[in-house]
Amino acid sequence: MAQTKYIFVTGGVSSSLGKGIIAASLAKLLQARGYRTTIQKLDPYINVDPGTLNPYEHGECFVTEDGAETDLDLGHYERFLNVNTSQANNVTTGKIYQSVIQKERRGEYLGKTVQVVPHITNEIKERIQILGKSGDYDIVLTEIGGTVGDIESLPYIEAVRQLKWDLGDHNSLVIHLTLIPYLSAAKELKTKPTQHSVKTLMESGINADILVCRTEHELSDDIRRKLAQFCNVKQEAVIQSIDASTIYDVPNLMLEEGLDTITLKKLDLPDDTAPDLTQWNQFLQRHKNPTAEVTIGLIGKYVELQDSYKSILESFIHAGAENEVKVTIKSIHSEFLDVDHQNSVISSLDGILVAPGFGERGIEGKIEAVRYARENKLPFFGICLGMQMAVIEIARNVLNLKDANSTEMDDCTKNPVIDIMESQKNITQMGGTMRLGAWDCELKEGSLIEKVYGKSQISERHRHRYEYNNAYQEQLEAAGLISSGINPQTKLVEVVELKDHPWFIGVQYHPEYKSTVATPHPLFIDFIRAAKVFSQKRK
Ligand code: GLN
């Protein structure tokens, strides 16, 4: 196909309407018709990337194969499309300004005054077109973070306006996602906020081509007609997005509403093949018809905010469907998990996952949870910091190294069983400097982890500064903690597992970033299988 087509997704009325899910659902439908699609997120904040943001601020930081620390929406894109994203798929205002200022310092603007228009907007336009120009995609969807009317979104909206003009007819379109609130006192859905937000978009020179309306109640024909007339779109371009019980229903809901059909029509693309959602619907079928149930304790310190562990929660949904098991997640705050609370909280679980994290807060609770899982042969899954906690627990309670710790928490400990990586020692800048992205790992022959993957060479994504200290390897192995996954170049220990335990695995990497609907992650699948076995024994 000659010309890459561009779809821009903007939001109005309110934040948190789920632009990412709508973009991912439409991309899924287009992909299921044979179009090569990708999705990009533009974030209007000044951080260069969300890597330096606290999860309470921004939810999980998603990591791509090429080591970009990105917005969690990229996780949705990968989980829906089963296609990797990259550095180019997440752009922030910080990145845009950083690059414009660097160009200015290099003298590339040849003495001109550097301004928001055209220099910032040109930089945005270039970033939008990088994916399209790669030749890898027929359709690029670009989600613009924030809500129209926000001061910080203005350069993005202007860049979209210009790009629509540059690309010419039928090569781009704008989907505007809004909220149709329901006033229960009046028993009415209200269209006025949407009319205002479409008007705001028009003031910036952009006509929405398609309206996607989030609503808790069905939109009547009358409401659809009114929205079409007052927002300047065809009635078939008013798409209802009613609340769904799972985000994975949204592609089918959008299909019923004809979002893909109207998109293809507006982009002048053939609409001759129906989307093939066979595999997707098989997953939904399994997800909605479980034959058993397990309860997993998610032990972390950001549990108040579900978005902090987004990819882990979604990985459990994929793995649950694969096992035809309903996975109920019990979020447990590691700060409040002490010996007294343990029996009542953990004893009702079929498995525990100790979550990734940074800093000292809550780590003693995590270590206690590991101890309980080890002693009670409860399936245990540790990810990143969770793996490090397992190493510390065994050093303290089996090897009797009472002050064993990570130098992240106590840099004076006499037993630094987890220590800063050599390559991290001289790093002073915090942004983008961790060990990031995909690294190879070799799995030990005959280990549980090798059985789980069904192969011995793997590659997984990382995000950390500290590591298993190889000086303690002999002692830890003698205590039963096997190093069953090693990076072949650096010899870093990436996986530990416990002998004589049905399922006790800690991984230094983040398997949750690679679980998708089409390819659920083997570690999550097998952990849920083990939890099911545990729950059946308990009964
Ligand atoms: N804080 C730990 C480290 O930097 C673990 C990081 C994580 O869990 N992602 O090594």
Image (cartoon, rainbow, N blue to C red):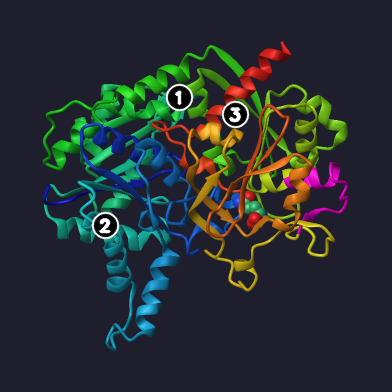
Residue 12 locus on image (x, y percent): 38, 45
Q: Which residue is mark 1?
A: 186
Between 238 and 347, the one lying in front of the other is: 347
Point 64% across, 63% down: residue: 421
Q: Which residue is mark 3?
A: 527
Residue 215 locus on image (x, y percent): 40, 29
Above or below residue 113? Residue 125 is above
Gap in angstroms between the C-alphas marked 2 and 1: 38 Å
Between 189 and 119, the one lying in front of the other is: 119
Dividing the picture into quadrants, the one containing residue 237 is top left
Label 2: which secondary element: helix
* Disc assigned to residue 160: 2
Q: Which sits earlier in the primary sequence, circle 2 or circle 3?
A: 2
Residue 537 locus on image (x, y percent): 70, 14
- Between tags 2 and 3, which lies in front? 3
Crowding at dot 1, Cα within 10 Å, few <14 / some 14-19 / many 20+, comes out as few
